[in-house]
Image: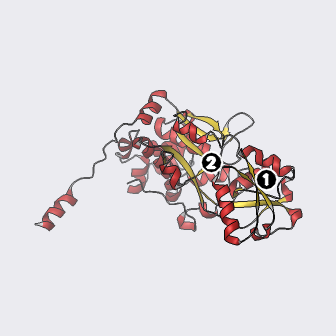
Amino acid sequence: MRNAFRAAILALPVLCTPALAGQTFDAVKQRGAVICGVNSGVAGFSAPDSQGVWRGLDADYCRAVAAAMFGDASKGRFVGTSHQTRFTALQSGEVDILARNVTLTLTRDTALGFNMVGVNFYDGQGFMVPKRLNVTAAKQLDGASVCVTAGSTSELNLADFARREGIRISPVVMGRFEEMVPAYNSGRCDALTTDASQLAALRVSAITNGAEHIILPERISKEPLGPYVRHGNDQWLDIARFALMAMIEAEELGITQANVDEMLKSQDPTIQRFLGVSPGFGKALGVEENWAYAIVKLVGNYGEVFERTLGKGGPIGLERGLNDLWTRGGLMYAIPAR
């Protein structure tokens, strides 16, 4: 009897039912635009170009969410936030998503009332120093002064690193992230510490004679960066999460902006489901069936976005490294659309 019952359950069809509507989802739909809180000036992640157009990995993620919601990537709007205002902007409802190269942590996911969407960049905290100091390893910073932002994960990581290695570091704690670069440029501190990707961006955009500075090879922390949404908005979390997953899965499946129309003819059932040729998953999310197609067509897959924002086609020229696909030795792995 038990086996017969189990067989009957397994024989039941899997139905894609729409998620319950939520406050943020409904508000975004009614407004006709997604409002994203972004960093107001970190090259490669989010920064306005000379024409005022926001460019970067986080900016394009927001466009992907808009493409999924409305079939129109231009329906993404951007609000520049500072280190001090970023969380308040999300908590207050000023923005729908915070996509500001923010480290995903337990306390932010609980005490601040946020939900992690997923990791869109695997990073780690590092150090930048002038070449003239002849420092080649982080342990050689014994006795150095290091600029760091107050109240950041970087401040805690710096203190932990010094204790762990048994070295003496004098933190030069700045109230605002934007104050660190002038302090470093003026020689107020020997080294600058934050996420290594931000150090790379600062070196090409804000550090005086950037070629005369190096980023030390050590990473003293894990910094998984990604978007956040508010607690209590499950359907909005679903859209935000699977927009990111769609960018990654498209790269896994070999679907690009250039070939996505041709891929609509594929007989691969996974691709048919992903692109909405086989219906059901758009309904489950509360959007059009071609939501993933719209993301790839209008924004691109994760690899395409990475290369033009952070990679060789962008201002920083980072290697993929940990942010390559899992099939190529990286950590990027999509939750399947099935």
Quadrant of residue 221 in the image?
bottom right
Name the residue located 79 percent from the left edge and 53 percent from the top edge.
203
| Farthest-out residue, top | 31
Q: Describe residue 44's horizontal placement relative to residue 10 as left or right.
A: right
Q: Residues within 10 Å of mark 1 (few under 14, many from 20)?
A: many
Q: Is residue 35 above or below residue 267?
A: above
Q: Do the residues bearing badges 1 and 2 touch, measured as CB atoms within 8 Å?
A: no
Which kind of residue does numbered mark 2 sit on? Leu
Q: Which circle marks residue 327 in the picture?
A: none
Q: Which circle marks residue 57 in the picture?
A: 2
Which kind of residue does numbered mark 1 sit on? Arg
Q: Nearer the viewer, mark 1 or mark 2?
A: 1
Is residue 283 visible to the viewer in this orientation of the structure? yes
Name the residue located 52 percent from the left edge and 31 percent from the top edge.
33
Name the residue located 70 percent from the left edge and 58 percent from the top edge.
196
Badge 1 or badge 2: first in the primary sequence: 2
Applied colour scheme: secondary structure
In front: 190, or 39? 190
Is residue 206 visible to the viewer in this orientation of the structure? no
Q: Could you tell me which secondary element the residue under label 1 belongs to?
A: helix
In front: 122, or 323? 122
Pinpoint residue 269: horizontal percent, then vertical percent.
38, 56
Pinpoint residue 102: horizontal percent, then vertical percent.
60, 50
Q: Is residue 219 above or below residue 17?
A: below
Q: Which circle marks residue 203 in the picture?
A: 1
Q: Describe residue 269's horizontal placement relative to residue 320 as left or right.
A: left
Pinpoint residue 91: horizontal percent, then vertical percent.
52, 38
Name the residue located 60 percent from the left edge and 44 percent from the top edge.
60
